[in-house]
Image (tube, helix red, strand yellow):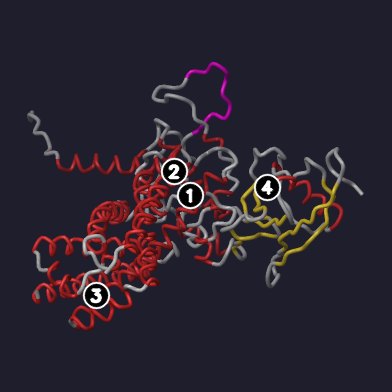
Amino acid sequence: MSGPDTPLPRRDPGVEEILRTRRASGPVSRKLPGPVAWFDVRNRSTGHLAFSLNRITGLGLVVYLYLHLGVLSLLLGGESSWGGFLEIATTPIFLGLDVLLVFGLLVHGLNGTRLSLIGSGFVPNHQKALFWSLMAFGAILLVYTALHVFAVDG
Amino acid sequence: MTTVGRSTPTTRTVRVHRFKRGDDAPRMEEHDVPVEERTTVLEALRWIQLHADPTLGLRHSCFHASCGTCGVRVNGRERLACVTPISEVSGTVTVDPIANLPVLHDVVADMAPFVARFPEPHPIVRESELLPGAATPDGIDAFDRFEDCIECGLCLSACPVAATDDTYVGPAALAYAQRLLEEPRADRDAILDWADQDAGAWRCHAAFECTEACPSDVRPAQRIMSLRKDLGRRRKEQGREASTPPSSEGST
Amino acid sequence: MTTETPLSPERSTRSRSWRWTASSGLALLVLVTIHMVAHHFVVDDIGGLRTYRNVLDYISTPIIVVIEGVFLVVVTAHAMLGLRSVLLDFGLSERWRSLLERTLVVLGVVTVAYGFVLIGVLASRA
């Protein structure tokens, strides 16, 4: 029988115990299958929206990283190869994708800043206000970038 | 026809999750339930049990949000059925068991995996009653009742990490660990070691849905962030100790 | 009902991944800004995009090589740590977690190596 002076045992979080009790029971009730639940913001609040946005922009940016390296490899083909890419890259659709990239960078970067703060234990009670104010700032930057990207003439 | 409450009754459609052990798959059943202005979801479910289908499995006890046993999802949101007025729910009222836990039957979840996540044993006895004018013990600035946690499991149900990771200890257990740290008799190292795991405090992605779902103002997300702050502080202290050369004391 | 397994020493500080993710992320706030400004706001062409000659002129400057090299390392590290964090949310067993971590290290090293080869080849053509 443990008393007030009995220290907590140094042990793992009882992961095996959790899994054992889980296996002993029936099917688990889930909101949606697997990772789809990460992106279901219906009936959820600001924090979940931030989590979903951060996750989807993060995964998108990882895909972009490799696409970007692939595109930059065209430089190895010389001026004609890169010139061919620039012809596509300067079309309105592609410039729009550039703006989408900036959107992803801003959301991920600004929300990441928020996560660094609250995840370190600072201002967790103001996480909603922090999110919306950072996104408002990001929106201003996005509009400025979009105007610049589409306005600069060749 | 029996109704609950005192105002003019209307009828609401209630869709209930049905599942018994041995069933191939869960199904949803609809019932038209007479309700009044102050009818709660729990009362509507009990009406179904008493007047339409006695095989409907429910779990409830106190009727006033202090036992935590009637946690369900109402139209996708984690709620305590006993204090959720049907009038606050729009459209068809869909009642599911809380998520991320096995279903025992119908809308009743198996709480054993929820309880298994908590660090054991609990060496600290906390007072559940507070006399008016009581002074705080030495080392405690103010009383902060973690007894607010009614272990309803709504936080675990709302957590997006628990939706895919059954090993994550979850918001309730982590909030409990943080509360233990506030006790002066706590073995801080043991508690922090327990929390300092991939399946512990570092698995939280700060969605704060646990805090949103909590009916008792425990604010588990804030407590997890506080736990992380304590872990960071300990790491710095350990770093400082490691870099400080041992003092040479005079020998006898 | 509960089990008591001893805490293994190498699992004593799991904060390292989170700290590196946060630190690299904060560093990227600066590095990405520099990178995006350099490639969209400096050249007066459509979208601010550089021609082949512009790219070679840009990458031939030693300080630029250093900045872009650091950016490459930091962004790859952040990406691998982020991927690790997302994939760990599937509740992987120790065996799969170990495999995942090793795979991400290899992927990260290959990515950085390829990026440096690219920088090196382009810088040499300037």
Picture quadrant of residue B185 = top left
**Disc 1 vs disc 2: Cβ atoms closer than 8 Å?**
yes
- Chain assignment, label 1: A
Disc 1 or 2, which lies upstream in sequence?
1
Which amino acid lies under the numbered mark 3 shown in the image of this protein? Leu
Q: Position of residue A127 (x, y in %)?
A: 44, 43
The residue range painted magenta reads: B125-135
**Horizontal and vertical percent for residue C50?**
22, 69
Q: Secondary structure at mark 3?
A: helix
Where disc 4 sits, the SS reads: loop
- The disc labelled 2 sits on which kind of residue? Gln
Q: Position of residue A12 (x, y in %)?
A: 40, 53
- Residue indicated by mark 4: B70
Residue A127 disc label: 2
Question: Which residue is under mark 1?
Answer: A47
Do pointers 4 and 1 mark residues of a single chain? Answer: no
Amino acid at pointer 4: Cys
| x, y percent for residue B169 | 47, 53
* Callout 1 touching callout 3 (CB < 8 Å): no
Residue type pointed to by label 1? Gly
Using the numbered discs, state the Cα–Cα distance from disc 1 to disc 2 in whole angstroms: 8 Å
